[in-house]
Image (cartoon, grey):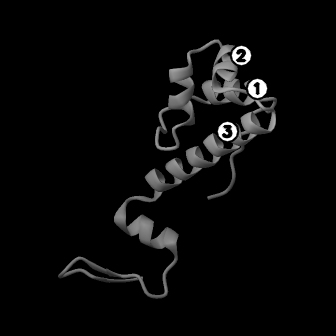
């Protein structure tokens, strides 16, 4: 990636998306939101496959439907792993987390 330091211009040609996100300082934010979107989608898909209402899932989790809506909101990244695991278990799944090389 070519950076013109006098103007602060970043030339994106020949660079990866990760390079661009690193340059703009947005990589962690974008990855966090993307991960949450995938998890919310997977929980919602499992809920539909098991023909469960949101109220039933919330009841299985021991929480309110409005709290479940916040958990399923793909832009709300402030959800604990424990809460995501409870949501996954309520729809017959389990949460699996792993650390991989960067």
Q: Position of residue 1 (x, y in %)?
A: 42, 82
| Callout 2 secondary element | helix
Circles 1, 2 touching at the beta carbon (< 8 Å)? yes
Residue drawn at 48 percent across, 81 percent down: 15
Dot 1, crowdedness within 10 Å: few (<14), some or many (≥20)? some
Q: Is residue 56 left or right of residue 28?
A: right
Q: How many numbered markers are drawn?
A: 3
Dot 3, crowdedness within 10 Å: few (<14), some or many (≥20)? some
Ranked by sequence position, the earlier of labels 1 and 2 is 2
User: Pointer 3: what residue?
Assistant: 44
Q: In 3D space, how far apart are the residues under numbered discs 1 and 3 (Cα atoms)?
A: 12 Å
Image quadrant of residue 59? top right
> Can residue 95 be seen here?
no
Nearest the viewer among 90 and 15 is 90
Ranked by sequence position, the earlier of labels 1 and 3 is 3
Circles 2, 3 touching at the beta carbon (< 8 Å)? no
Image quadrant of residue 10? bottom left
Q: In 3D space, how far apart are the residues under numbered discs 2 and 3 (Cα atoms)?
A: 14 Å
Ranked by sequence position, the earlier of labels 2 and 3 is 3
| Looking at the image, residue 65 lies above or below residue 37 | above
For the C terminus, the quadrant is bottom right
User: Pointer 2: what residue?
Assistant: 60
Residue drawn at 50 percent across, 72 percent down: 17
User: Pointer 1: what residue?
Assistant: 89
């Amino acid at each position: 990636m070519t950076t013109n330091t006098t103007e602060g211009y970043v030339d994106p040609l020949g660079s990866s998306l990760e390079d661009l996100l690193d340059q703009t300082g947005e990589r962690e934010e974008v990855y966090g939101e993307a991960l949450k979107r995938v998890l919310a989608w997977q929980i919602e898909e499992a809920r539909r496959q098991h023909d469960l209402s949101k109220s039933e899932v919330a009841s299985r989790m021991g929480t309110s439907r409005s709290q479940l809506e916040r958990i399923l909101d793909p832009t709300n990244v402030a959800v604990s792993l424990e809460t995501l695991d409870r949501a996954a278990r309520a729809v017959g799944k389990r949460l699996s987390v792993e650390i991989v090389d960067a």
